[in-house]
Image (cartoon, grey):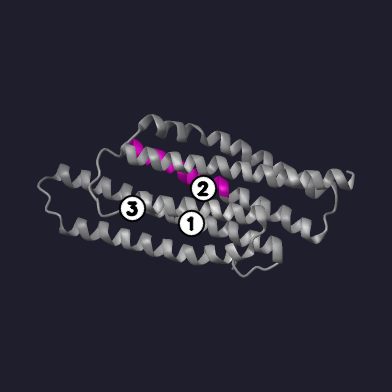
Amino acid sequence: MARQSYQEKLTELREDVLYMSEVVMERLRMGMDALEQKDEALAREVIEGDGEINRMYLDLEQDCIDLLALQQPVASDLRFIAASFKIITDLERIADLATNLGEYTMDAKRDLFPDVDVQEMGELTLDMLEDAMLAYDTEDTDSCRELAARDDELDQFAERASEIVVRDLIERELASTEEVEQILQDVSRLLLTIRDLERVGDHTVNIAARTLYMVENDDELIY
């Protein structure tokens, strides 16, 4: 492969990774909207769209393999390809978490915990993911380090939200076995939602970590 063509392929890879991130962010946003609005049609769209993300991931995985096989890359190109491969893996897993939100929507009939702002948490994760992908695109290492600190704030948010749910459950007076079962289902769904959004934050930090390694050969956020 001619060097110019190889560089063009590297550019295409970056563009394709960014496009995948846009699709994943849109699916995550749709999952949050479906959960907030109890919109089962939107939830199904998120769930059924997971196959598209998986195919996109497999295509990009093959592109990374081809780039490694067709020409021995210099160190900086090698880090870029390896980082891109790791990033699409995190994006695919974020898409899986968005699918979870769609599935939770199918069971969500009511909101019993008004003090837990899941939508705010979702917006925090979306902002982090958008900034992580911008850092990948522009090779902004300062943003990568800032994202790690922001994830600590997200973790604290998730911990507080979980404590509110558990405390509320303890303090509730339940009249019947049926009501207990319903409340437990609601609590389980909400705790899973909090956990999954926290995991989106973790994957976002992974993206920032790989970008930092790609640009500076610095693995401080990986370990």
Q: Upstream in the sequence, badge 3 or badge 2?
A: 2
Q: Is residue 135 magenta?
A: no
Secondary structure, mark 3, is helix
Q: Quadrant of the N terminus?
A: top right
Q: Which residue is mark 2?
A: 94
Q: Which residue is mark 3?
A: 191
Residue at the farthest bottom position: 220
Prevailing secondary structure class for the magenta stretch in the rendered image: helix
Q: Amino acid at mark 2?
A: Ile
Q: Is residue 116 left or right of residue 80?
A: left
Marks 2/1 in contact by CB < 8 Å: the verdict is no
Residue range (magenta): 91-106
User: Cα distance, mark 2 to mark 1?
Assistant: 9 Å
Which quadrant of the view contains residue 121?
A: bottom left
Residue displayed at 67% across by 68% down: 218
Q: Upstream in the sequence, badge 2 or badge 1?
A: 2
Residue density around tag 2, few if under 14, some if 14–19, many if 20 or more, within 10 Å: many
User: Cα distance, mark 3 to mark 2?
Assistant: 17 Å
Q: Amino acid at mark 1?
A: Gly
User: Cα distance, mark 1 to mark 3?
Assistant: 16 Å
Q: Is residue 5 left or right of residue 156?
A: right
Please name which of the two marks, 1 or 3, marks the residue nearer to the observer: 1
Secondary structure, mark 2, is helix
Residue displayed at 65% across by 45% down: 17
Q: Amino acid at mark 3?
A: Leu
Residue at the farthest top position: 41
Q: Which residue is mark 1?
A: 201
The image shows residue 29 at horizontal and vertical percentages of: 45, 42
Residue displayed at 42% across by 31% down: 44
The image shows residue 99 at horizontal and vertical percentages of: 45, 40
Q: Upstream in the sequence, badge 1 or badge 3?
A: 3
